[in-house]
Image (cartoon, grey):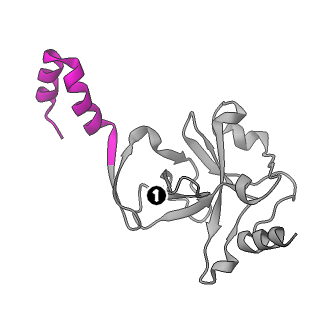
Amino acid sequence: MYHKWYILLLLRLDFRLARPFYREEVDKMKLVTSNFGEINIPDDNIINFEKGIPGFEKHTKYVIINDEDKDSPFCWLQSIEDPDLAFTLVNPYLVYQGYDPKFPEGDIARLGQAKPEDYSVLSIVIIPENIEEIRTNLMAPIVINLKTKKAGQIITEGDLYPVKYYIFKELQENKAK
């Protein structure tokens, strides 16, 4: 970390020169993870789960790590507080044709005011030893308000979507049709 006096001196000399040093040190967090090694995360990428994720209530701060393969529907939700805790996520709209979840107004309101396009919906993936049994929870996806960076695992209204949606099995059945 640069000393405050050094940054102030640079600010007086040339603001354009000082800003990159200051922003890099202050606005990024170095995170050491078990799965992804050491990564730098901009502070404004941190997502806050006010109540945590069911079963992991003590962990409230996460960051999304995207797959290097731009065509991959998967990404990861990495805990800031626990380097060993990361969830694999999938874009449910890519694995379930016609996915259109409805959420209780109160649950969405807790994430802050935003337009529908300001929300991201992802679902947690379970990857068992037998990869053909890979599944995701479509009934209770992760909903992220991209403006407020607040998130929660929210149960959809009704019973249209399964808790265990077998991705591989469904893809195979759709190919056979």
On screen, residue 130 versus residue 138, left or right, reads left
On screen, residue 127 versus residue 28, left or right, reads right
On screen, residue 44 versus residue 52, left or right, reads left
Q: Nearer the viewer, residue 72 or 124?
A: 72
Mark 1 sits on what residue? 79
Give the answer, above or below, for where 3 lies relative to 162.
Answer: above
Q: Nearer the viewer, residue 168 or 106?
A: 168
Q: Whole-percent x and y of residue 54?
A: 62, 61
- Looking at the rendering, the stretch of residues picked out in magenta corresponds to 1-29
Instruction: Determine the residue positioned at 64% across, 35% down.
Output: 118
10 Å neighbourhood of mark 1: few (<14), some, or many (≥20)? Answer: many
Q: Is residue 3 magenta?
A: yes
| Disc 1 secondary structure class | strand
Q: Which quadrant does the N terminus fall into?
A: top left
Q: Residue most toward the front?
A: 176
Q: Which quadrant does the C terminus fall into?
A: bottom right
Give the answer, above or below, for where 35 lies relative to 68.
Answer: below
Q: Whole-percent x and y of residue 122?
A: 65, 53
Instruction: Determine the residue positioned at 66% across, 30% down.
Output: 113
Q: Residue most toward the bottom?
A: 130
**Count of number-bearing discs:** 1
Give the answer, above or below, for where 172 lies relative to 47.
Answer: below
Q: Whole-percent x and y of residue 55?
A: 59, 66
Would you identify the image quadrant in which residue 22 lies? top left
* Magenta part, dominant SS: helix
Q: Is residue 66 magenta?
A: no
Instruction: Determine the residue positioned at 33% across, 37% down.
Output: 27
* Type of amino acid at the residue the image marks with label 1: Ser
